[in-house]
Image (cartoon, rainbow, N blue to C red):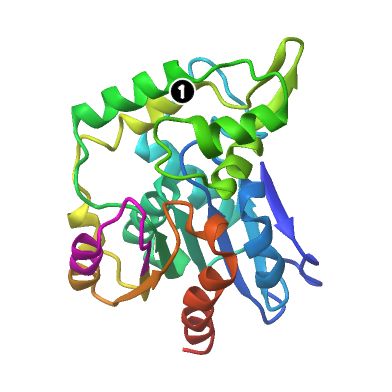
Amino acid sequence: AAWEFGDPPKTDPSTEHDGRLGVLLLHGLMGRASHWASTARWLSERHRAVALDQRGHGRSDKPAQAAFTREAYVDDAEAALEQLGLAPAVLIGHAMGALTAWQLAAKRPDLVRGVIICDMRASALGAASQREWSDWFKSWPVPFATLADVRKWFGEDDPWVERPNAARGEFYAEVMHECEDGWRPVFVPDQMLRSRETWVYDAHWEELTQVQCPTLVVRGLDGELGRAEAQEMVRVLPRGEYAEVSDAGHLVHYDQPEEWRGAIEPFLDAVRTG
């Protein structure tokens, strides 16, 4: 499922962009296209912005036997660019979506004009990280009685929360839907773990070296991507740049939307006019 923000092209999208830069927004694990709404609103003033509900997420289908490999996610993004006539486009990815973005840029440089990597590590995270995530899913007090309970648990009560974070609560409220017994996630937690296990055991530095287009690495000051690793990612990227958003955690675009815009808009302008 793809969400297009703003007016569609006035002409056949497969032949021209109506003078606008094509932008494909790729959410992270458990996310959905609507998480990009605030970003897409200002993007759509000057660019053609499309956000994708990736497989297993949001409104996309969730068949039990679906493939959740890296290749599948990359192929989906590739198909979206081609079918929607967005290419060559800028890919903006958060977390897992950022990995998809740089893997697609390495695979199909003809489709990608630029990449923005938001708070995603290139190093392997390992088995312990996967076990922690499995245990974390089991700790969720589902079903939640109300959306207010969702916001409170993920924003305050979740053991993973170091200090109250209202933006985090809103982020997770966005991925819940009302069922007969209360509020549950729109995704299947086991499918999220299957998606995650296809990349957490491996490092992804080699693919970064193959990204030939301009690439901006953005980290939240309190996010999951440390400064040293982010700067090393910039170093190995052929055309890497670095930006940092203060007072932001992993959910950079949710925590500090204005600062996020200030970090990425100059890069987009440079790609568009370059």
In front of the other: 232 or 132: 132
The answer to if 267 sits in the magenta stretch is: no
**Residue 257 appears in the picture as rendered:** yes
Quarter occupied by residue 172: top right
Q: List the single residue furthest toward the bottom.
A: 273
Q: Amino acid at mark 1?
A: Gln
Return the x and y of residue 86 as percentages of the image width and height. 60, 64
User: For this view, does 215 lie left or right of residue 231?
Assistant: right
- Per the image, the residue denoted by label 1 is 191
Quarter occupied by residue 143: top right
97 w.r.t. 16: above or below: above
137 w.r.t. 47: above or below: above
**Residue 14 appears in the picture as rendered:** no
- Residue at 59 percent across and 40 percent down: it is 169
- Residue at 45 percent across and 67 percent down: it is 112
- Residue at 58 percent across and 49 percent down: it is 167
Q: List the single residue furthest toward the top.
A: 181
Disc 1 secondary structure class: helix
- Residue at 65 percent across and 20 percent down: it is 144
Please provide the residue range marked out in magenta: 217-233
Return the x and y of residue 244 as percentages of the image width and height. 37, 71
251 w.r.t. 49: above or below: above
